[in-house]
Image (cartoon, rainbow, N blue to C red):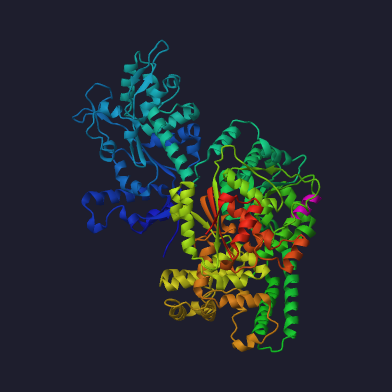
Amino acid sequence: MVISTHSSSVAYEAGFETLRYFKRSPASEDQPIPQAEVVNLSTVFPSQTKRDSNVSATHKFVSRYLKSTHCDLFFANGIILVEGAAERMLLPHFIAHNHKNLQRSYISILEIGGAHAQRLKPLIELLDLPTLVITDTDACSFSGTKKRPKRGASLGFGSDTLKSWFGFNGLTLDELLDLPPERKIRDNVRVSFQCGIPAKFTPQTRTPKEVIPYTFEDAVALTNLELFKTLSESSGMVKKMHLATKMRTLDACCNAMYKALDGEKAKMALDLLFDVEPAKLLVPEYIKEGLDWLESELDTKSLEYTWVPKPSASDVITELLMSNSNSLIGVDREIYEYLSLENPKSFLLFAGAGSGKTRSLVNVLQKVREKKLDRLIKSGQRVGVITYTNAACDEIKHRLSYDPLFHVSTIHSFVWKLIEPFTEDIKEWLKEKLQADIDDLSLKLSKVRCINGKTAQQNIRKIESKSRRLDELSLVRTFSYSPTSNKVERGTVSHEEVIQITATLLNESHLLQNILTNRYPILLIDESQDTRKELMEAFIRTQSLNRSKFSLGLFGDLMQRIYSGGKDDLETALPEDWKTPSKIVNYRSPKRIVSLINNIRDEDDGKKQEPKAEAIEGRVRLFIVDSISANKPEVENDVRYKMSLITDDALWLESNYTKVLTLEHAMAANRGNFDKFYMPLSEVDHLRDSLLNGTNASLRFLCYQFLPLVNAIKARNDFLIASIIKKYSGVICSSNIRFCEDPLSILKEADDSVSRIAAKVVDGDPSISEVLQLVDKSSLLFIPDTLKALLVNVDRESIENEIDVSETSFAWEVALNAPLSHLNNYSLYINESLGFGTHQGVKGLEFDRVVAIMDDDGSKGFLFKYEKLFGVKALSSTDIKNQAEGRDWVVSRTRRLFYVICSRAQKSLAVVAYTQDPEAVRNKSLASGWFKEDEIEMM
């Protein structure tokens, strides 16, 4: 059994032997995502049989101490160890009034005593948390007699912490006091102890005299001499310290304070809190130095957990301009003015490749927070920000310091939050949709020649599934949706349904329009070119009906659109009163590459960018290769070698420092061995986008439930197998009556099922369908109804003789007959782990050295054709018709893709064009102005 807890009581009752601590490791350039390391706390102290008596005593003390105090050591960002109750009571006030950043961190303050602090050393070193140890020097003679600390008095010190933990046992008190700050640090631990305080005892004193306190209590008094002189009405030790300030000399004052230290120290802290406003207390210098160090360490840690690349010179200049100005500049200022709460304007921002779109978005939002925060809070309103990916969402949240004023989320999460309360409306929409689907399937079923044919049987299953869902709608009290969950249960809605329902309700419901515009008077949508057409049109219509109180801001670039479901006429279909600001500077690419992508774009919308002022020149080369005779791996290695000579950059020879972009998914599928799964599905329009963005329920099931189970079985990882089955099926759960009655039999059946699957997959590469049928038969996973309907067993001849086979069913049929390895490679590809990059995967990213591969023969796709872009192949009648009607067509899609790929390069770019007609490609490249004569090489 594994228990995850944030309860200190549970943690310390369990004992070190059973505890595992998840220690965060910071992000870095090599690993931009923070990691967690599992620390086995049983290693803090050796096992009972291996401990010596001292280790055993330490183990007992630490265990008993942590258990008795119920401290929050394991759940802290930082640790402070103090000697006594006075420090423990006053430190939180010192932090609150003098260290605001430190106050925002979770600090565990442990009162441990000077004689025992070092016993926590093994545990603190293992946790690796920034730790401040505040201790007394315990000044004494070399024979061990307690003495008031003075310089030049041949004194030592008695602190066990300073001797045993920090190794200062060979020093005198004078040498200890003179230690530089860096000597007080051991890895993640810093020690602070009393140091000299420059004091002016009377107004007539011109030169401060150094005095050295013995403990925390007299350090506070000597640091606040003038304040203690006023505390005549106090009692206890505070009263004694006050009386000491009445002595005639500073030395006599220090002697009196030293003698007063035998009193109740904890009571002194309480009396001080009663008599004095904590903000008026000056912090003793040695404690201030320690808190400064701890604050700096935690600030550094927090930055490390999100690695940020080193900024360019232009980034630094821009940041300085922004930080030194009370107002935004350029386009950022223009956008901010549109977001007026009194006179809102809506806009579409053109932000070409590398233009700093996210920086502008964040700059404007920060200004909104600065100027409009109070009004928005009083009105109970927020600013909505919609991004396309979770990664972009996290990045913007981080840059905005996770301020709750801004609701930053992906499109699916945002719209679900909007429509979630509309249970009856969702139910009515689903009723109409399900009934329409059932009617359509029933009509198809009535026309089949053979009811036992595969398509007929699949349609029967679909009708049964949809009818069951339709009947269960009456039982649904609330609907649920999770952008990360694949489990289908009663009352869940799919990714696709969330978008469609929101678009419908926004168009039809004035109530939902009012909720949106009243809750979010400002709504900004990033990557607007890829927002679903029907949803984008609903947002624009809502804005047109509420233009006096609602500002809709769209950020994007139609030249960089990825998915086919977006609104491709976005620029021309906007209302006349919309604004269209532009960011024209490309901060990423060198001058030559900016010139290239401008020329590529010239045949599309003609928009131009400018390179940043300090941009380097950069190098581009086009290598044209005869595709009939080419040895492609050899060609691409030769290209890298040539680029290393052309650019005088040896890193072109290192594969880890060169990004190869295959430009097109079908090409990647062919090279990455997942074409048998990918290609059939990619040919179906409504499946194509979901193949790439992961929103299809069946694809999510295959990649995030089915495949992990198969891989766990192949690895013979019994623990992982059991956890996947328990999480994603009804076999091992309390709702399974058979499991409750006879769990051993059910577990035996599950184990037998796993063994049957293992016989197929461990040493073989069966079809996806074969393994899926075994999983279905044993109910090891809940299989989505759309996939389950396909798992019907009929002979192959009956399938081939069927006429009425739906395009979608046929595509899935072929895809599921692909080898299991093709599904695995597809999963690696969409998770960016297969080694191939496309414009979908790399948009927004940038690389110093880019190799762009154009290869129609290698792709076997139909959406993109480089031979047509370069004029090698004639246009089809469909191409000519689509072009004439102003629709998206093969050349426009290919040109956009080429633009995005080329714009990734920060230093140099090599384009490798495989073609059946090298001379035609050369002529087109020169005639279009894309490449110059000396930039083209025939290979």
Picture layout, residue 725 above or below residue 648: below
Residue 486 in view:
no
Residue 744 sits above or below residue 874 on the image: below
Closest to the observer, 672 or 423:
672
- Magenta highlight on residue 542: yes
Left or right: 882 as drawn, with respect to 118: right
As drawn, the residue found furthest toward the top would be 204
Of residue 781 and residue 284, the one placed in the foreground of this image is 781
Residue in the image at 64% along x and 31% along y = 326
**Viewer-nearest residue: 49 or 394:** 394
Rendering coords of residue 517 (x, y %)? 74, 49
Q: Position of residue 734 (x, y in %)?
A: 52, 73
The main secondary structure of the magenta stretch is: helix
Q: Is residue 778 above or below residue 203?
A: below
Could you say where residue 205 lies in the image, as x and y percent from the top left? Answer: 39, 12
Spot occupied by residue 143 in the image (x, y as percentages of width and height):
18, 30
Which corner quadrant holds the N terminus? bottom left
Which residue does the image show at 45% across and 58% down from the upper left? 4
Q: Is residue 507 visible?
A: yes
Magenta segment: 538-545
Please say whether residue 460 is one of the residues in the magenta stretch.
no
Q: Quadrant of residue 798?
A: bottom right
> In the figure, residue 367 lies in which quadrant?
top right
Tell which of 531 and 210 is nearer to you.
531
